[in-house]
Image (cartoon, rainbow, N blue to C red):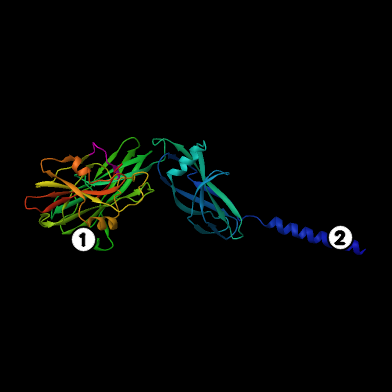
């Protein structure tokens, strides 16, 4: 009798435990990613916006701590952006995310022989139960990719990234864009004027841009006339509204003042055409630059640099990645190791054998070009570039 009763009690307890386990289920009933697929161009970083629509059958906090690129078996990269939202039973909630796909992800996937991967997120409810949503990413050509901006290069109408101008001078900025896919670009030309540029710059809109662009063509946009009514430093940018970019859009600057470069104004920037930053010096290397008005002579200066590890590759991108400002300041506080004087009628030169005798093999040097007027004042100066000897 006792054994029978004990067996019945145990059976009831086991049945109760089974019921408890069976009621532990996810509050999340559905996750939809919009858009559910993306086509990205290989070899470059790409960004896209995805809306996660999550439905729950309970009032429950929802949380996703990270996203991941890959397959069920391989993870190529993770995104440590946290998404939070509180769900109302039966009512879908939306979480919007901007996703940046590093170029390295596409390279790694293709090395595995994959033509597509997923970007996936686990959404966890209040009970800690996870439900997964995903976007399928296909690799394609630039023309077949989702519309995006992969490159922006800014300059002034004379091709330089820096300008020295007189009050009320007329000047424009230009933007050169490379895109993937086809779509409508929406952007705004903006300028920060003095005195805000002495601290945290305050940008004001100049004009809006709406233009249809397609991959395979380089789009060139010109700004309206830039303000030059007050002396001081100005900053210019093209703020892209759509599509979202995976990089920070560059800023260019111009200085407005009275006088002329070297005489009341800073030296004008000299545009150097060759050699590029981090160039390896060869016997036939030529230094080529754009002429500077009113220059009487040019002076090429070469400075010795303390020994450090050489980079394996030159810096990539549209903005010249020259030496750091701190290191340049230290090196330029010394006298030049050697140099060349060039008459103003010439805008290129090579290093003579006498100059090259001052340069040791396997070393790093800094160089710059100065433009000097007839009174001996420096009226032009190039950025400092790095040069390597073999």
Residue density around tag 2, few if under 14, some if 14–19, many if 20 or more, within 10 Å: few
Residue 126 is situated, as x and y percent measured from the top left of the image, at: 59, 60
* Above/below status of 305 relative to 126: above
Question: Foreground: 276 or 294?
Answer: 276
Q: Nearer the viewer, mark 2 or mark 1?
A: 1
Reading the image, the residue beneath label 2 is 7
Magenta highlight on residue 83? no
Q: Which residues are magenta?
A: 278-285
Residue 168 is situated, as x and y percent measured from the top left of the image, at: 13, 54
Question: Foreground: 38 or 274?
Answer: 274
Residue 189 is situated, as x and y percent measured from the top left of the image, at: 26, 50
Q: Is residue 378 left or right of residue 85?
A: left
SS assignment at label 1: loop
Q: Is residue 15 left or right of residue 380?
A: right
Q: What is the distance, in whole Å, between disc 2 and disc 1 at their CAs?
A: 88 Å
Residue density around tag 1, few if under 14, some if 14–19, many if 20 or more, within 10 Å: some
Whether residue 375 can be seen here: yes
Reading the image, the residue beneath label 1 is 194
Residue with the most extreme left position? 375
SS assignment at label 2: helix
Residue 207 is situated, as x and y percent measured from the top left of the image, at: 25, 50
Question: Foreground: 54 or 17?
Answer: 17
């Amino acid at each position: 009798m006792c054994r029978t009763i004990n067996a019945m009690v145990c059976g009831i307890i086991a049945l109760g435990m089974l019921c408890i386990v069976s009621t532990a289920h996810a509050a999340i009933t559905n996750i939809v990613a919009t858009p559910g697929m993306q086509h990205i161009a290989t070899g470059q970083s790409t960004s896209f916006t995805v809306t996660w629509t999550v439905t729950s059958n309970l009032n429950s906090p929802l949380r996703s701590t990270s996203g991941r690129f890959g397959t069920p078996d391989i993870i190529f990269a993770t995104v440590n952006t946290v998404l939070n939202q509180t769900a109302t039973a039966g009512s879908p909630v939306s979480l919007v995310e901007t996703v940046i796909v590093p170029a390295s992800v596409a390279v790694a996937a293709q090395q595995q022989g994959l033509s597509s991967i997923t970007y996936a997120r686990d959404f966890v409810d209040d009970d800690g139960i996870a439900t997964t949503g995903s976007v399928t990413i296909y690799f394609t050509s630039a023309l077949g990719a989702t519309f995006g901006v992969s490159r922006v290069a800014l300059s002034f109408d004379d091709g330089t990234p820096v300008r020295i101008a007189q009050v009320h001078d007329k000047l424009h900025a230009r933007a050169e864009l490379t895109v993937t896919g086809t779509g409508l670009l929406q952007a705004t030309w903006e300028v920060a004027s003095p005195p805000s540029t002495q601290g945290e710059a305050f940008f004001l809109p100049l004009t809006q841009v709406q233009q249809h662009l397609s991959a395979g063509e380089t789009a060139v946009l010109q700004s309206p006339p830039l303000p030059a009514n007050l002396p001081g430093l100005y900053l210019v940018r093209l703020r892209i509204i759509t599509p979202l970019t995976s990089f920070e859009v560059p800023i260019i600057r111009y200085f407005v003042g009275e006088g002329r470069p070297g005489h009341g104004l800073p030296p004008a920037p000299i545009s150097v055409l060759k050699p590029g930053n981090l160039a390896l010096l060869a016997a036939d290397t030529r230094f080529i630059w754009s002429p500077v008005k009113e220059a009487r002579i040019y002076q090429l200066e070469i400075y010795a640099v303390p020994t450090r590890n050489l980079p394996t590759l030159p810096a990539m991108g549209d903005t010249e990645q020259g030496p750091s400002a701190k290191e340049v300041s230290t090196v330029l506080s010394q006298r030049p190791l050697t140099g060349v004087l060039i008459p103003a009628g010439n805008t290129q030169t090579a290093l003579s054998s006498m100059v090259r005798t001052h340069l040791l093999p396997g070393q790093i040097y800094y160089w710059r070009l100065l433009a000097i007027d007839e009174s001996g004042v420096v009226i032009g100066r190039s950025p400092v570039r790095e040069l390597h000897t073999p």
